């Protein structure tokens, strides 16, 4: 399951999101709202916007990772790593809703490659 390393990294309010994928519920987001959330998180560190992004993309990224490695616990760990990297690097990267989607999948793909 999740290592103590990841649990120690979760000092902010998203600890429950990063550690417990069972907290999720269905979230719909169009490109305008995704753009707004990206800009708001980058500019103000708006955690509510990051939460929307997390909830919208979590199942998609988890499914992508699981279909590539076929190991449930490792897929969960890699998915957490993906969102930790998104949280860490999103303020530094110039993104829009169009470029965000391939970017998050590229992070997932690179972590899958690192797993093998």
Image (cartoon, rainbow, N blue to C red):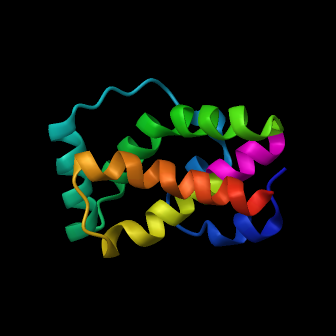
> What's the residue at 63%, 53% (across, down)?
80
Which stretch is magenta? Answer: 73-79
> What's the residue at 78%, 41% (across, down)?
69
Q: Quadrant of residue 55?
A: top left
Q: Relative to 58, does residue 85 appear above or below in the rendering? A: below
- Residue 54 lies, in percent from the top left, at 45, 45
Q: Relative to 4, does residue 62 appear above or below in the rendering? A: above
Q: Is residue 75 magenta?
A: yes
- Residue 39 lies, in percent from the top left, at 19, 59
> What's the residue at 33%, 51% (across, down)?
100
- Residue 19 lies, in percent from the top left, at 67, 51
Decide if residue 30 is on the left or right side of residue 49: left
**Number of residue marks:** 0
- Residue 113 lies, in percent from the top left, at 70, 57
Q: Relative to 108, does residue 52 appear above or below in the rendering? A: above
Q: Residue furthest bottom?
A: 92
Q: Is residue 43 visible?
A: yes
Given residues 54 and 14, the one toward you in this image is: 54
Q: Is residue 15 visible?
A: no
Given residues 78 and 106, the one toward you in this image is: 106
Decide if residue 18 is on the left or right side of residue 47: right
Q: Is residue 101 magenta?
A: no
Decide if residue 101 is on the left or right side of residue 71: left
> What's the residue at 81%, 57% (across, down)?
116
Q: Main secondary structure of the magenta part?
A: helix
């Amino acid at each position: 399951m999740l290592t103590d390393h990841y649990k120690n990294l979760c000092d902010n309010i998203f600890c429950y999101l990063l550690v417990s994928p069972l907290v999720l519920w269905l979230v719909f987001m169009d490109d305008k709202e995704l753009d707004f959330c990206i800009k708001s998180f980058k500019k103000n560190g708006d955690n509510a916007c990051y939460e929307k992004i997390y909830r919208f993309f979590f199942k998609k990224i988890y499914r992508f990772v699981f279909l590539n490695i076929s190991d449930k616990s490792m897929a969960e760990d890699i998915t957490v790593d993906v969102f930790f990297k998104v949280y860490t690097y999103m303020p530094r990267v110039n993104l829009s809703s169009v470029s965000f989607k391939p970017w998050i999948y590229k992070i997932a793909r690179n972590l899958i490659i690192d797993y093998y």
